Image: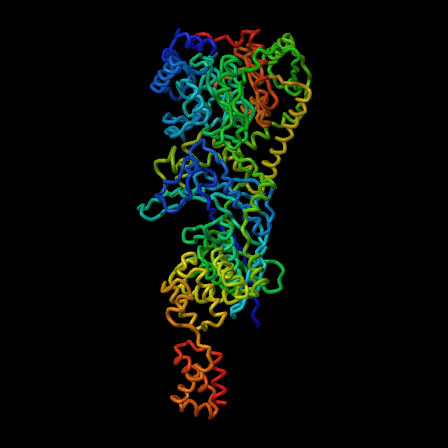
Amino acid sequence: MSRTDWEVVIGLEIHTQLNTQSKIFSGASTAFGAEPNAQACAVDIALPGVLPVLNKGAVERAIRFGLAIGATVAPKSIFARKNYFYPDLPKGYQISQYELPVVQGGQITLQVPDGKGGAYEKVVNLTRAHLEEDAGKSLHEDFHGMTGIDLNRAGTPLLEIVSEPDMRSSAEAVAYAKALHALVRWIDICDGNMQEGSFRCDANVSVRPRGQAEFGTRREIKNLNSFRFLQQAIDYEIQWQIDLIEDGGKVQQATVLFDADTGETRAMRSKEDAHDYRYFPDPDLLPLVISSEWIERVKGELPELPEALSARFQGEYGLSAYDATTLTASREVAQFYLDTVAAAGAANAKTCANWVMGELAGRLNKAELDITASPVSAAQLAGLVQRIADNTISNAIAKKVFEALWNKEGESADAIIEAQGLKQVTDTGAIEAIIDEVLAANQKSVEEFRAGKEKAFNALVGQCMKASKGKANPAQVNELLKKKLG
Amino acid sequence: MIESSLKDIAAALRDKKVSAVELATESLSRIEAGNARINAFVTVDRDGALATAKAADERLAAGTAGPLTGIPLAHKDVFCTEGVLTTCGSKMLSNFVSPYDAHVVSLLKAAGAVMVGKTNMDEFAMGSSNENSHFGPTRNPWNTDKVPGGSSGGSAAAVAARMVPIATGTDTGGSIRQPASLCGITGIKPTYGRVSRYGMIAYASSLDQGGAFGYSAEDCALLLSAMAGHDPRDSTSLEQGAEDFGRDLAKPLAGLRVGLPKEFFAEGMSDDVRATVDAAIAEYRKLGATTVEVSLPNARLAIPAYYVIAPAEASSNLSRFDGVRYGHRAADYGDLNDMYCKSRAEGFGSEVKRRILVGTYVLSHGYYDAYYIKAQKLRRLIANDFAAAFQQCDLIAGPVSPTVAFGIGEKSDDPVQMYLSDIYTIAVNLAGLPGLSHPAGFGAGGLPVGLQLIGNYFGEARLLNAAHQYQQHTDWHTRVPAGL
C-alpha cells in the first residue's frame, strides 16, 4: 500500500499588543511589570456604572497596519461584546470586533527558507485584523489553593491579525510570523516582545491528501509565544494528525495547548463544549468611523515599508532577494545598511551588505547586542569597505581592522591601517622578494608541486601571505607564484 | 418650605429666611416620619446631607450659590455615590459602597444640591412597580396599598410625599414617566445621550437615560439643566453642551401643534385615564394649541422589541456581577462555576433572572437573527413612525399608563401584564426621544393620572414649556396626598 501524500494547511491568528501609552478603553497605563492591580482603574476592574471610551491611538495603529499590508481600512467598523465568564475578564465580556473589523483583506510577501540555503517567495493573504482588549491574568501559584487575579493587563489594546489558511508547512508559518513580527515593529505599532506576551500566535492546523479540494478538520493550537515553539507545535500537530488518520481515526475540531516541556500538543476543549459567545454590538460604543482624511494623514506618516525597500535593494544595489529580505528584517538593520551604503557609495552596496549580514551580524549576535548599540558605526564600516574596494587591504586584513574597530583601537579604518601598518603590499618587486624567500625555504613543497600535487601550490601561497603578515595582495601573490613555478 | 417651588425655596435661601441646614433637617425629618410607611429610601445620609448643607450655606453667604445650592434632593440608587451605599435595589450590591461619583452626582454636588439619600427602585431598574426591590416595595403616598410605579418608584414617591422637592431617576422603558404619573408629580426623560450614563448602573445601555422628578415642569427644568451636558467618559453622550431647558417656559402655546396618535387612543386605556387625558388635551386646546391625529403604526411592536433588546443588553451588562471583585459572594461554594452560580442565584431576584435568561436566549447562536436583529429592525421602524408624525406636529400627547396605580401584589405573578403597563412609554425609549409626564387629574380611587408629552429630538425645552403653561392654568401639580 502506498502511503498517502499529505498536504498541510495552516492559518495563523496573531495577537499583537499595540504600543499605546494607555489602555484601549481607559486611561490606565499599559506599562509592563507593575505591582499586580496597580494599573487597573475603575473601568478596567468593571465597577458598576463605568463606561468604555475608545483610545484613538489604538485605532491609528490599526490604520497603519492596514495600510502597510495593502488592506481595506473600513470606513465604519463595529465593536462587539464577546460574552463569557472568567475571573480575569472583569466585565464578563470582552470588547472586540466581530462582524465588521477595522482592517479587511491585505497580503504579505515572504521569503521562505527552502532548507537548502536558498529561499522561495510566498504570498500570504490576510483575512482581517481587528481591535480588541486583552484580559487580565489568573495567578494560580502562591495563593494556597486559591487564585489571584491581576488586572493590569485587562484592557490592553490588541490587534488580532488573522491570515487565510495559506501556509503549507511549519517553515512557511514561521516565515509568515517572522515577517509579521518584523512589520509590526517596522511600523512601530507593537514592541514585538514575545516574552512579555506582546506577540502571541494561535495556529490552525489541518492535513488533507494532496489534491483534495476540501480542507481537513482543523485543531487550533493556542498561545505560542516563540517562533521555535510555533515550529515545534505545528510539526508535532501535523504528525499527530497524520498518524491518527492513517490509524483509521478522525480528527475532531478542538482547541489544543502546546506543552513546551514535552513538545506535545494536547486537547483543551472540543467543539462540543465550545462557548457560545453571544456576540452583539456593544451599545456603549458608537460605530468606529474612520474618515479618508485620517487614513491619508496616517499614510503620509508611514515609513518606507520593508517590501518596498527590499525591492529597492534588489533593483538599485543588485542584492539577492534573500539578502534584501535579511537586511529589511528590522528597521534598525535596514537603516544601518542604508547609512553604510550612503557613506561607502552605492558601487560598494554589495560589499556593505556582506559585511552587515556577515561579520557585523555575527559579532553582534555573539555579544548579544542590538545593531543600534553596535560598537562599529555605519560610517566606520563604510570606511573599511572603501579600503577593501580600493585594494588598500585584503579581506583577511579587513577582518583584523574590523576587530580593531570593534575594540575601539582606532577612530577609523584608515587610522587603524596606518597605525598598525596593515596597508596591502602591491609592489611587484616586494612581493617577488617574499616569494623567492618562501621558495628557497620550502623546496619540498616546490618539488611536490612539480610532481603534480596542486595542494602544494596553496600551501606556498599560504606561506607567502604569512611571510607578508597578510599584507601582500593575494591575487598578485597567486599570479607571480604561478609565473615563478611556471 | 420643602413643599414650595424651587424658585421660592431658592429665594428664601437667598433672603436668609431659611438656611440649607434647616431645609436638609426638614427633609430628613419628613423622611424619618414617612419612610417606614412609604419605603422610598434605601439609604438616608443624614451626616453627609448636613455637612453638604453647611457648605451650601457658606456658598450662599459668599454669594457664589447657583439655583440648586442648598436644595435637598434624592438620587435613585442606580447612581453611584462615592462613600455612600449604592445598591441598585439588589441583594447583589447590598454591600457595595462606590469609590466614585456618577457624572450626574458630581454635577449636582458641584451645583451645591444637598443629597439626603438614595431612593428605592426595582432591582437593576427592571420593573414597573418597585415591587422587585430587595429592600421591599415602595408604597404610593396617595394610597399605600398601591404601587408607586417603577422602576424609579422610590424617587417619585419621595417627591410625591414631599420628602424632597426634586429627585433623579432613570428611564429605560418608562421608569420616570410611569411613576411620575402614578404618584402625581412631574417627570422628564430627555433625549437619549443628553445625560451622561457614567456611573449610572447599566440595565439596557442603548435605552437607559437619566432624568428628573419635581413638583412642576419649572422645577424639572432646573434640575435637568444641571444634570445634562456632554461627558467625554460616556461615548454615547451627545456633543451638545449644557443648556437652560427652562428658557422657553413662558412662551405662549398659541400655534402649538399637538399630535394625538390614533393607536394610543384606540383601546387599552381604562375609562378614568381616558377621561382625564381627554380633559387635559382640551385644556391644551384652550391654551391655543391645535390637535392633529397622527399615526404610529408600529408602536404596538414596541413591547416585543423592547423585551428582546433590553434583556439582551441586560444579560451582558449584569455579567460583571460575578462575586469576584465586589458585591455578593456566596458563603459556601465548590469550584469557580459553583461560586458564580450560587453568588448570582442568591444575589439576583426573580425578575432580574428572568430577563438575564431571556437576554441570553435571544443572543444565542441560531436565535440572534430571529430575535435581536429583528428587534433592531422594529426599533428603526418605530423611530421612523415618530419622525413621520413630527412632520405634522410639534409634540405628541397621550396617556402614560393604561390605568392608575394598581395594587401591590396585583400583577406580580403575571410578568406580561406588568410589561403591558409600559405600552405607551416604551416606544419613546426605542426611538431615543424626550418624554415627560405631568399631573392631569385623578382617576379611580382618587389616584393621580398623568399626561404624557413626547417631543422631537432635543425638544426638552418645548416639552417643559408646554407642561409649564398647562401648570400655569391648572393646579393638579400642587395637589398633595392626604395625611402628610
- In this rendering, the answer to whether A264 lies above or below B153 is below
Q: Where is residue B384, by image quadrant?
A: top right
- In this rendering, the answer to whether A257 lies above or below B180 is below
Task: Specify whether B229 is left or right of B74.
Answer: right
Q: Position of residue B297 (x, y in %)?
A: 67, 25
Q: Which quarter of the rendered picture does the N terminus of chain A lie within? A: bottom right
Q: Does residue A248 appear in the picture of this structure?
A: no
Q: Position of residue B484 (x, y in %)?
A: 43, 8
Q: Where is residue B290, by image quadrant?
A: top right
**Image label count:** 0
**Residue lying at 45% horizontally and 72% vertically, measured from the top left:** A393
Task: Specify whether B343 is left or right of B148.
Answer: left
Color encoding of the figure? rainbow
Q: Position of residue B447 (x, y in %)?
A: 52, 11
Depth check, front residue: B81 or B172: B81
- In this rendering, the answer to whether B268 lies above or below A391 is above
**Residue lying at 45% horizontally and 33% vertically, measured from the top left:** A50
Depth check, front residue: A204 or A302: A302
Q: Position of residue A433 (x, y in %)?
A: 42, 84
- In this rendering, the answer to whether B210 lies above or below A111 is above
Q: Does residue A206 appear in the picture of this structure?
A: yes
Depth check, front residue: B142 or A122: A122
